[in-house]
Image: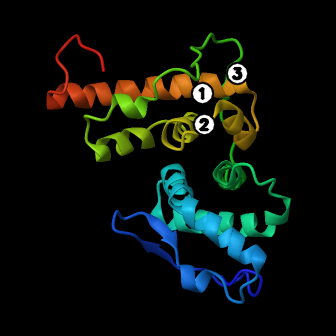
Amino acid sequence: MALGISLSIKAPIREDAEGKGRIGRAMLFGRRDYKKDSFEQQAERVFSSVFGTALRLTRSREEAEDLAQEAIVRAYEAYDRFDGTNFKAWILRITTNLYINKYRSRQRGPMMASLEDENVAEPMSTESQIPDRQLFDGLVGAEVEQALKRVPDEFRLAVILSDVEEMSYQEIAEATGVPIGTVRSRIARGRAMLRRSLESYALKEGFIKEGEDL
């Protein structure tokens, strides 16, 4: 994908030493100008977050590559409208919106029951709470990732943006198009689901004893 020249050509996603996706720098941009130089510098810094978020959302490397590529293209096309304050939050909002739109467009059957039942009292998470990613540092990363995959989409997305990408509640609300109250609810419920899943694993592996909590 040579931005500004041929948007139909994809840039290769290469893996760094940690296995994280990154942009094929030399092939992403052709002719150089100020806009491309500025965008390239910012995109290189956050691409591992874009790709990592896409991978956790789609749970498929191939789909994550497609989603990350499309997010980069969309971000470049809209770069003139970027206000310059928080590039990472801005491009993750684009990534999130693309995912949500694609996910919803694939639904062809009856609409699923809402995960946000207004008549159900839900726990609310405050921004001052310690993210669960810190609570699970002693566990195996692969098991945490597997547990995260089992969390339903809306809740998984909220937890990823909050606890992995460290976005504020306001940024998550803007990225997902829901009120901050809904963001707090989704994060609290997502963390609870993740914690329950990991507690069984931690008990089995001896990280905690019967009757203890993570």
Query: What residue sits 70% from the left and 21% below the top?
Result: 181
Which of marks 1 and 2 precedes in the sequence?
A: 2
Most extreme residue toward the right, as rendered?
A: 81
- Residue 25: name its quadrant: bottom right
Task: Reply above or below: 47 against 204.
Answer: below
Task: Say which mark, if any, is on residue 154.
Answer: 2
**Circle 3 Cα neighbour tier, 10 Å, few/some/many (<14 / 14–19 / ≥20):** few
Q: Is residue 59 left or right of residue 203?
A: right
* Percent position of residue 149, x then y: 44, 43
Secondary structure of the residue carrying tag 2 is helix
The quadrant in which the N terminus is found is bottom right
The quadrant in which the C terminus is found is top left
Q: Amino acid at mark 2?
A: Glu
**Circle 1 Cα neighbour tier, 10 Å, few/some/many (<14 / 14–19 / ≥20):** many
Q: CA distance from mark 1 to mark 3?
A: 9 Å
Q: Mark 2 near mark 3, Cβ–Cβ under 8 Å?
A: no
- Residue 185: name its quadrant: top right
Foreground tag (2 vs 3): 3
Query: What residue sits 26% from the left and 26% below the top?
Result: 200
Q: Mark 2 near mark 1, Cβ–Cβ under 8 Å?
A: yes
Is residue 63 visible from the viewing direction of this image? no
Most extreme residue toward the left, as rendered?
A: 206
Task: Reply above or below: 148 against 83.
Answer: above
* Percent position of residue 10, x then y: 62, 80
Q: Which residue is mark 3?
A: 181
